[in-house]
Amino acid sequence: MALDVTSARAIGDAIGFGVAVAGGAIGDGLVFSRLVEGVARQPEAQGRLMSLAFIGVGIVEALPIISLVLFLIHLIG
């Protein structure tokens, strides 16, 4: 059973999307673990650290969202 180009492209896109989502999950975990460490060391800086953490999560989550859009474009087109 031969693998045609369209199927190979779909499999490659799915693997790439999976890797991007895994990277985003690892990045989110790292951001929030550092947030907890920072708040444990300096509780008075919680507000500032929380806002920086949300900015960091937004940046980290950009990769999986862009990857999802590209995956859907390749799937449709």
Image: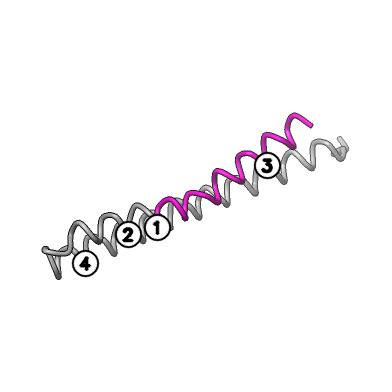
Sequence order check, earlier mark of 2 and 4: 4
Residue at position x 15%, y 70% in the image: 41
Q: Please, which residue is most extreme toward the top here?
A: 76
Sequence order check, earlier mark of 3 and 2: 2
Image-based side of 20 in relation to 45, left or right:
right
Between marks 3 and 2 in the image, the one whose residue lies nearer the viewer: 2
Task: List the residue tagged with mark 1.
Answer: 56
Q: Which secondary structure lies at badge 3?
A: helix
Q: Are marks 2 and 4 in contact (CB under 8 Å)?
A: no
* Amino acid type, callout 1: Gly
Q: Which secondary structure lies at badge 4?
A: helix
* Amino acid type, callout 4: Gly
Q: Gap in Å between the C-alphas at discs 1 and 3?
A: 22 Å
Kindly indicate the quadrant of the structure image that contains residue 73: top right
Q: Are marks 1 and 2 in contact (CB under 8 Å)?
A: yes
Task: List the residue tagged with mark 2.
Answer: 52
* Amino acid type, callout 3: Leu
Q: Which secondary structure lies at badge 2?
A: helix
Image-based side of 21 in relation to 31, left or right:
right
Q: Position of residue 54 (x, y in %)?
A: 34, 52
Sequence order check, earlier mark of 1 and 3: 1
Please tell me the numbered disc located at residue 11: none
Please tell me the numbered disc located at residue 70: 3
Q: Gap in Å between the C-alphas at discs 1 and 2?
A: 6 Å
Please tell me the numbered disc located at residue 38: 4
| Mark 1 Cα shell of 10 Å, populated few (<14), some (14-19), many (≥20) | some
Residue at position x 52%, y 49% in the image: 62
- Magenta-highlighted residues: 56-77
Q: Position of residue 21 (x, y in %)?
A: 52, 47
* Amino acid type, callout 2: Leu
| Mark 3 Cα shell of 10 Å, populated few (<14), some (14-19), many (≥20) | some
